[in-house]
Image (spheres, rainbow, N blue to C red):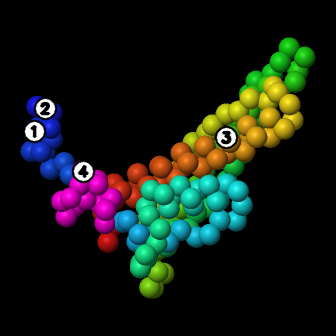
Amino acid sequence: MVGLFALSGCGFTPVYGTAPEGQGNDLRGRIQVAGPADEEGFALVKRLEDRLGLPQGADLSLLADIRITEQSVGFLPDGEISRFNVTGQVDWRLNRIGDGGQVATGRERSFTSYSATSTTVATTFAQRDARRRLMVILADRIVTDLLTRDLP
């Protein structure tokens, strides 16, 4: 309880607070995310829209460039690959819709892993799930970055 009182004196404002400075509520429905080009893009856009709201009178546009690589990191005694790391990077730009002026840019990186020790079908599903999880992580990082900036 004492911690809450200490934070109130330092200028701390909750992102989703009711105060005028609550950036989370200010961005809700204002950002139109560019349509996805593939399954990973779809997962990224879905998570961004879940967090930022569907565009309603959007005045900002978010464009994301996704890059994904996979690296084998685990091996069985017979040399078969047992684990993969999936590394992702998203370079993003936030532009004004009216004049195309750039408002913010950023780069987010992270990774997930999946096991490849089961059947081909199970490994394929594990790979798809790892990529989807990676897009959720990266979308959450984009949202966090946006919420901590002083955007118009």
Q: Which mark is residue 14?
A: 4
What secondary structure is found at the residue carrying circle 3? Answer: helix
Picture quadrant where residue 3 is located: top left
Q: How many marks?
A: 4
Q: CA distance from mark 1 to mark 2?
A: 7 Å
Q: CA distance from mark 3 to mark 4?
A: 32 Å
Residue type at numbered disc 2: Met
Q: Are marks 4 and 1 in contact (CB under 8 Å)?
A: no
Q: Is residue 106 left or right of residue 44?
A: left
What residue is disc 3 on? 130
What crowding class fits label 1: few (fewer than 14 Cα within 10 Å), some (14-19), or many (20 or more)? Answer: few
- Residue ranking furthest to the top: 77
Q: Which residues are magenta?
A: 14-26
Q: In the rendering, at what x and y percent does residue 4 appear?
A: 15, 38
Q: Which mark is residue 5?
A: 1
Q: Is residue 53 magenta?
A: no
- Residue ranking furthest to the right: 78
Residue type at numbered disc 1: Phe
Q: CA distance from mark 1 to mark 3?
A: 41 Å
What secondary structure is found at the residue carrying circle 2? Answer: loop
The residue positioned 82% from the left and 27% from the top of the image is 118
Q: Which of marks 1 and 4 precedes in the sequence?
A: 1
Q: Are marks 2 and 4 in contact (CB under 8 Å)?
A: no
Q: Is residue 48 above or below residue 35?
A: above
Magenta stretch: dominant secondary structure: loop
What residue is disc 2 on? 1
